[in-house]
C-alpha cells in the first residue's frame, strides 16, 4: 500500500481503490483520450471531499471529479486521484414543488431527478441524450444542454446555488451578486469589464472557456453561473440547488423531412418563432431503418407542447404548414414519440460507425454557430472534411446551431494523427469565422482547449489562466484542461493498443477479424449504465443488479482495453481482474442489440474464458454445465432418468452433487425427462399425418430433447396442424440427402460404421469458453446436417438461446466453413416458420392475456416481430416485459451467482407475473426462463407452442397422441 493510499484510507469514510480494477475502469471517458489515475475515491459527503483534497494537496497529486464518465472531450480522465460521486453522493436531498427547485448531490443521475419531479408536473430543463446515466455534477461541470435547450436553455440557466470545496479546502456557496466568490475574483473581473463585455460571442450554445461574462454587474455577478462549464478545474461541487420548469401537459412531435441536411439546417432557425421545445436534426446515414420516418434525406424533430393533446397537435400542425418540407409526420402517441426519440438519442453511438462499418471518432463533436448561419457552416464544414479526405455524419441541435459529428479519423497511425491535428486547427478557424464556439455542449477538455486562442485570442486565454489561479493556485484540480492544456493529439487511448493481430477464436466479421477493433467499439456513451430498462430492452442486467461499473458492458470493455494495453492490467488473458468482471456477465447478448455500437460482451467473455483457462484447471461448473449435453445423453442412453431424479430429490445427495459440480446450493436440480423428445418421435413414426406442405426440420436442442420434451411435442402438433411436414435432423452422417417426405432418408450403409450422433449448437461450450470443444461439436453437427443443407427446408429451433447460437456463434466460430453460414441462414424460430411456410394458416383463438418476458437472446439476435404477430392472431393480448430472467443458461446455476440471478428476475419478470390478472398465460419460450419462474415464483411458464397446441385440443387428432 502506498503512503497516499494509506493516508486516504485513514481520513476518508468512503471507498478508496488503488487496485488494478478501480484504476482501469477510470482510464477513459467517452472521448479519444486515456490517462491512468493513481487511485479512485468514492466520497460519502463533503467532508470526505475536503479530506481527499487536503491529502492530495500535501502531496501534489491532482484531483479529477467524475460523474457518469460520458464526457466527450477527455475532461473526466486524469493521472491523479479520481473522485467517483456515483456511488454515495448520488441523492436527491430535497424537492420543493412550490419554489420549483431541487437540491441535488453531484452523483445524482438526471433521470432520477426527472422521475421525482414528474408527479408535480415539473422537470429539469436540460436533457442530454445520456439522460439515463449522466449526473447533475457532470452536467454542471460541462454546462450540458440537450435537445430542449431552445426552450429551457443550458444547465447554467437552471442553476440557483452551488456548494463547492476549493482546492485549498475552502467551502463556498456560490450564487448571484458575488455570493461565494473566492478572494480576488471580484477584483480581477471588475478590472476587466471591457474585455468581459466584448470578448464573448453572442450565441445560445457558447460553452467553450470560462463563462466570465456571467460576472458582469448587468448579469447579476452570478458566481454559480460562471462556475458552470469549468470542467472541475476551479472547485469540486458537493451540492447544487437547481431550478425546475413546468412540463407541458401534452406534447406532439412533428418530424419534418427535407432533401438533405443543408436544407434542414437552413430551415431550423425559421421555426424558432413558433416556440418549439426542440429543433433537432439528423441525416439519413444515421438511421439504420428509416421506415418509421417521413420521406427525405434529413429530418428535423420539432416538439411542441400544450395544455392539452389538441393544443400540442395544433401547434405541431402549424409548424408543419410553415415549414417547406418534402414530407412530414405528426405523432401525438407517447409510445410513438419515444420510439422516434430513441432513433435520435442513439445517434451518439450510431455515429461511431460509418455506414460501411468504418470507425468514426469524436474530437469535433459539438461546435456551435449562430443558428441563422448553420446551413452555410455545414456546407463549409463538409468541404473541409472532403479536402482532408475525411467523412462524418453531422446531427444535433439545429435550432441552437450546435452540430455533433463523429469523423473517421485515423488515430492509429502517425500520419493519421497528424492529419487529425491539421484538420482540428483548420476547423477551429472555420468555426470562429462563422462567429461560433469550439464547444457547444460537451466542453473543451483536451480535445479543444489547446485551440481556445483561435476563438478568444491570447489575452482572453491569459485571463482564463488568471481566474484559474484565483480559484486553484496550486493547479491541483483537473490540470491540463481549459488552461495550460495538454496537446490535443497526446494521450490518445488507441496508442497503447497492440498493432499486431491478436490470435483469437471467433471471426469478428464486423471488425475485420480484429479483436482490438472489437474492443474499441465501446466509445463510452454508457447506455449500459442505465438503472432501469424500458420496453423490450435488455442491456445490462448485471449492472442494474449490482450498480458496479465493472459489471457494466462499458466497464468490462474498459478492462479488456487495458488488458490489451498491458500497462494497468499486466497479466493479459490470465488476468483475474478481467475474469472477475466478466464473471457476472450473463451472456444475455443484450448489448449486441441495445448498445448503439453493437458491443458483444457475451462473445468477448467466451473468447476471454477460452484463453484464460487454456491449459489450466477449469471451474467445476464448466464441466458440470458446459458439458451438460454429454451428461444428459448418457442418462438417456442408460435409461437412468428415474434414478437421477430420485437421487436429486434426496437432499444430502443433491447437496453433494451441487458442491461437486460448482452449482449454487440455493438451486434445485431440474428434472430429467424419462422419455426424450426424439424417442417419442420415433415411437409415433407410423402416426405421422400425410401432408403436402413444406418440409421443416425441427431441431432437437438439448433442453427440448432431455428436459422439456413437451415443448417439442407441442411444436410438432402445431406445425402439422398448419400443414407442414416435420422431420428431425439425421443422426448419422449421410452421403445423400433425405428423400424429403419428412419420414425417411436415403441412408449410406457405411454411416452405420461411423456411429450415431446428435446435432448440437454448442451453446453450453460457448458460454463457458470451451471453444475448441464447441468447434468440434459444431463441425460434427455440420457434417450431420449436410443433407438438410442440400434441401430448401428451414431449420426450426424452439429454444431461443440455441437459435441465437446457430445464427451467430456457429458462423463466427467456424468462419472458415461455408456450411456454417448456410446453416445460420436456415434457422427460423417457431413463429417465423409458421409465418413464412404456412402463411394461410390461422392459429386457434386463445383469447387470454399474457405475461412473461421476451427471451433476451430472442430480443438481441432473433427478433420477436413474428411472435408478436402470431400472438395477436391467436388473440393473446398484452406485452411481454424486457430485461433478462437472470438464470441465463449456466449463469444462474453457478455457485456465487444466486443473488445476482434473483435480482435480475426481480427487476421485470417476476413483478410482471405477480401483477398479472387471473387467467393470464405466462409465456416463456426459454428453458432458463421457465426454470427461473418455477424456482423463484412457483409459476409454470409455457412455450408459445404449448399454448397453441392446447388450444388445438378440440380438433380431433389423427396420430393418437
Image (cartoon, helix red, strand yellow):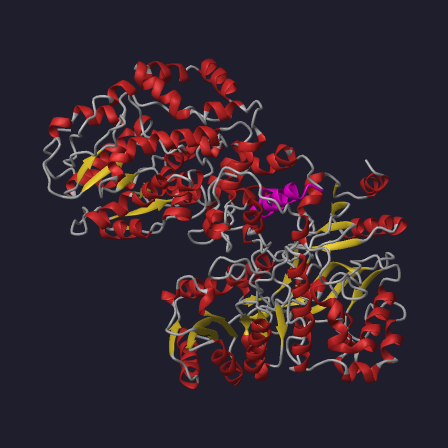
Residue drawn at the location 40% of the way across and 47% of the way down: 861
Indicate whether 112 appears above or below 547. Answer: below
Q: Is residue 559 magenta?
A: yes
- Residue 265 percent coordinates (x, y): 52, 79
Magenta-drawn stretch, dominant element (helix, strand or loop): helix
Horizontal placement of 761 versus 748: left or right?
right
- Residue 583 percent coordinates (x, y): 56, 35
Residue drawn at the location 16% of the way across and 49% of the way down: 841
Closer to the camera in the image, 98 or 752 = 752
Q: Quadrant of the C terminus?
A: top left
| Highlighted magenta segment, given as a residue range | 550-567
Indicate whether 626 appears above or below 41. Answer: above
Closer to the camera in the image, 88 or 719 = 719
Indicate whether 915 appears above or below 200. Answer: above
Dividing the picture into quadrants, the one containing residue 427 is: bottom right
Q: Is residue 961 magenta?
A: no
Residue 426 in sight in this render? yes
Residue drawn at the location 53% of the way across and 41% of the way down: 604
Q: Quadrant of the N terminus?
A: top right
Residue 665 in sight in this render? no
Horizontal placement of 593 versus 193: left or right?
left
- Residue 855 percent coordinates (x, y): 39, 43
- Residue 572 percent coordinates (x, y): 64, 36
Closer to the camera in the image, 120 or 604 = 604
Residue drawn at the location 78% of the way across and 84% of the way down: 197
Dividing the picture into quadrants, the one containing residue 485 is: bottom right
Amino acid at each position: 500500500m502506498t503512503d497516499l493510499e494509506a493516508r486516504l484510507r485513514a481520513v476518508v469514510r468512503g471507498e478508496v481503490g488503488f487496485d488494478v480494477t478501480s484504476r482501469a475502469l477510470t482510464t477513459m471517458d467517452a472521448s479519444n483520450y486515456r490517462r491512468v489515475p493513481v487511485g479512485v475515491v468514492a466520497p460519502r459527503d463533503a467532508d470526505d471531499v475536503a479530506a481527499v483534497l487536503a491529502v492530495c494537496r500535501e502531496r501534489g497529486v491532482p484531483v479529477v471529479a467524475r460523474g457518469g464518465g460520458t464526457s466527450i472531450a477527455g475532461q473526466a480522465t486524469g493521472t491523479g486521484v479520481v473522485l467517483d460521486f456515483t456511488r454515495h453522493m448520488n441523492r436527491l436531498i430535497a424537492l420543493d414543488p412550490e419554489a420549483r427547485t431541487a437540491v441535488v448531490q453531484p452523483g445524482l443521475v438526471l433521470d432520477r431527478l426527472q422521475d421525482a419531479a414528474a408527479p408535480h408536473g415539473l422537470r429539469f430543463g436540460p436533457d442530454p441524450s445520456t439522460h439515463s446515466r449522466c449526473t447533475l455534477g457532470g452536467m454542471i461541470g460541462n454546462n450540458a444542454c440537450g435537445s430542449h435547450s431552445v426552450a429551457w436553455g443550458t444547465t447554467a440557466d437552471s442553476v440557483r446555488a452551488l456548494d463547492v470545496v476549493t482546492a485549498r479546502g475552502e467551502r463556498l456557496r456560490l450564487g448571484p451578486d458575488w455570493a461565494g466568490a473566492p478572494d480576488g475574483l471580484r477584483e480581477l473581473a471588475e478590472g476587466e469589464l471591457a474585455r468581459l463585455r466584448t470578448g464573448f460571442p453572442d450565441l445560445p450554445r457558447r460553452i467553450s472557456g470560462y463563462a466570465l461574462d456571467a460576472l458582469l454587474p448587468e448579469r447579476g455577478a452570478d458566481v454559480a453561473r460562471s462556475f458552470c462549464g469549468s470542467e472541475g478545474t476551479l472547485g469540486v461541487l458537493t451540492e447544487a440547488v437547481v431550478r425546475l420548469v413546468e412540463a407541458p401537459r401534452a406534447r406532439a412531435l412533428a418530424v419534418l423531412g427535407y432533401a438533405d441536411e443543408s436544407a434542414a439546417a437552413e430551415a431550423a432557425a425559421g421555426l424558432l418563432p413558433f416556440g418549439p421545445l426542440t429543433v433537432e436534426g439528423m441525416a439519413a446515414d444515421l438511421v439504420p431503418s428509416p421506415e418509421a420516418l417521413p420521406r427525405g434525406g434529413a429530418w428535423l424533430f420539432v416538439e411542441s407542447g400544450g395544455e392539452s393533446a389538441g393544443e400540442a397537435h395544433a401547434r405541431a400542425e402549424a409548424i408543419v404548414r410553415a415549414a417547406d418540407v418534402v414530407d412530414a409526420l405528426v405523432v401525438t402517441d407517447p409510445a410513438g414519440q419515444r420510439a422516434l426519440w430513441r432513433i435520435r438519442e442513439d445517434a451518439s453511438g450510431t455515429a461511431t460507425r460509418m455506414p460501411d462499418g468504418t470507425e468514426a471518432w469524436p474530437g469535433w463533436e459539438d461546435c456551435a454557430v449562430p443558428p441563422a448561419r448553420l446551413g452555410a457552416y455545414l456546407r463549409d464544414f463538409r468541404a473541409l472534411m472532403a479536402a482532408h479526405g475525411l467523412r462524418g455524419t453531422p446531427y444535433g441541435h439545429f435550432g441552437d446551431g450546435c452540430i455533433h459529428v463523429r469523423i473517421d479519423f485515423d488515430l492509429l497511425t502517425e500520419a493519421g494523427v497528424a492529419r487529425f491535428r491539421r484538420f482540428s486547427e483548420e476547423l477551429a478557424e472555420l468555426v470562429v469565422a462563422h462567429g461560433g464556439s469550439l464547444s457547444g455542449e460537451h466542453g473543451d477538455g483536451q480535445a479543444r482547449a489547446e485551440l481556445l486562442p483561435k476563438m478568444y485570442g491570447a489575452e482572453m486565454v491569459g485571463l482564463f489562466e488568471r481566474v484559474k489561479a484565483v480559484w486553484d493556485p496550486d493547479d491541483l484540480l483537473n490540470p491540463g484542461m481549459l488552461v495550460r492544456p495538454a496537446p490535443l493529439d497526446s494521450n490518445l487511448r488507441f496508442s497503447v493498443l497492440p498493432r499486431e493481430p491478436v490470435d483469437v477464436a471467433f471471426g469478428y466479421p464486423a471488425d475485420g477479424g480484429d479483436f482490438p477493433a472489437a474492443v474499441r467499439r465501446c466509445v463510452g456513451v454508457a447506455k449500459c449504465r442505465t438503472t432501469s430498462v424500458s420496453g423490450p430492452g435488455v442491456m445490462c442486467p448485471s449492472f442494474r443488479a449490482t450498480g458496479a461499473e465493472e459489471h457494466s458492458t462499458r466497464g468490462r470493455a474498459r478492462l479488456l482495453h487495458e488488458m490489451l494495453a498491458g500497462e494497468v492490467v499486466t497479466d493479459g488473458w490470465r488476468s483475474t481482474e478481467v475474469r472477475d468482471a466478466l464473471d457476472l456477465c450473463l451472456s444475455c447478448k443484450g448489448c449486441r442489440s441495445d448498445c448503439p455500437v453493437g458491443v458483444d460482451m457475451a462473445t468477448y467473455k467466451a473468447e476471454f474464458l477460452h484463453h484464460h483457462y487454456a491449459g489450466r484447471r477449469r471451474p467445476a461448473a464448466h464441466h458440470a454445465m458446459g458439458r451438460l449435453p454429454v451428461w444428459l445423453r448418457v442418462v438417456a442412453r442408460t435409461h437412468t432418468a428415474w434414478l437421477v431424479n430420485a437421487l436429486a430429490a434426496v437432499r444430502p445427495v443433491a447437496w453433494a452433487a451441487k458442491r461437486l459440480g460448482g452449482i449454487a446450493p440455493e438451486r434445485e436440480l431440474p428434472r430429467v425427462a424419462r422419455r426424450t423428445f426424439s424417442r417419442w418421435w420415433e415411437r409415433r413414426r407410423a402416426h405421422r399425418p400425410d401432408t403436402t406442405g413444406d418440409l421443416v426440420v425441427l431441431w432437437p436442442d438439448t433442453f427440448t430433447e432431455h428436459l422439456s420434451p413437451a415443448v417439442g411435442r407441442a411444436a410438432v402438433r402445431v406445425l402439422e396442424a398448419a400443414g407442414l411436414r416435420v422431420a428431425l435432423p439425421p443422426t448419422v452422417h449421410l452421403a445423400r440427402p433425405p428423400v424429403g417426405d419428412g419420414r425417411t432418408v436415403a441412408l449410406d450403409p457405411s454411416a452405420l460404421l461411423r456411429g450415431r450422433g446428435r446435432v448440437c449448437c454448442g451453446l453450453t461450450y460457448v458460454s463457458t469458453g470451451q471453444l475448441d470443444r464447441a468447434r468440434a461439436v459444431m463441425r460434427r453437427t455440420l457434417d450431420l446436417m449436410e443433407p438438410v443443407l442440400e434441401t430448401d427446408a428451414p431449420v426450426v429451433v424452439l429454444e431461443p438461446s440455441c437459435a441465437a447460437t446457430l445464427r451467430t456463434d456457429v458462423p463466427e466460430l467456424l468462419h472458415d466453413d461455408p456450411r456454417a453460414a448456410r446453416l445460420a441462414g436456415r434457422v427460423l424460430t417457431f413463429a417465423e416458420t409458421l409465418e413464412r411456410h404456412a402463411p394461410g394458416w390461422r392459429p386457434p383463438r386463445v383469447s387470454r392475456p399474457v405475461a412473461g418476458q421476451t427471451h433476451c437472446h430472442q430480443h438481441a439476435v432473433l427478433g420477436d416481430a413474428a411472435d408478436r404477430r402470431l400472438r395477436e392472431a391467436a388473440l393473446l393480448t398484452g406485452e411481454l416485459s424486457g430485461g433478462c430472467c437472470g438464470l441465463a443458461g449456466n449463469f444462474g446455476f453457478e455457485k456465487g451467482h444466486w443473488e445476482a440471478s434473483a435480482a435480475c428476475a426481480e427487476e421485470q419478470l417476476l413483478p410482471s407475473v405477480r401483477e398479472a390478472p387471473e387467467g393470464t398465460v405466462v409465456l416463456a419460450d426459454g428453458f432458463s426462463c421457465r426454470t427461473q419462474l418455477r424456482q423463484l415464483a412457483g409459476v409454470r411458464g409455457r412455450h408459445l407452442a404449448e399454448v397453441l397446441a392446447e388450444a388445438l385440443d378440440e380438433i380431433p387428432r389423427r396420430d393418437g397422441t
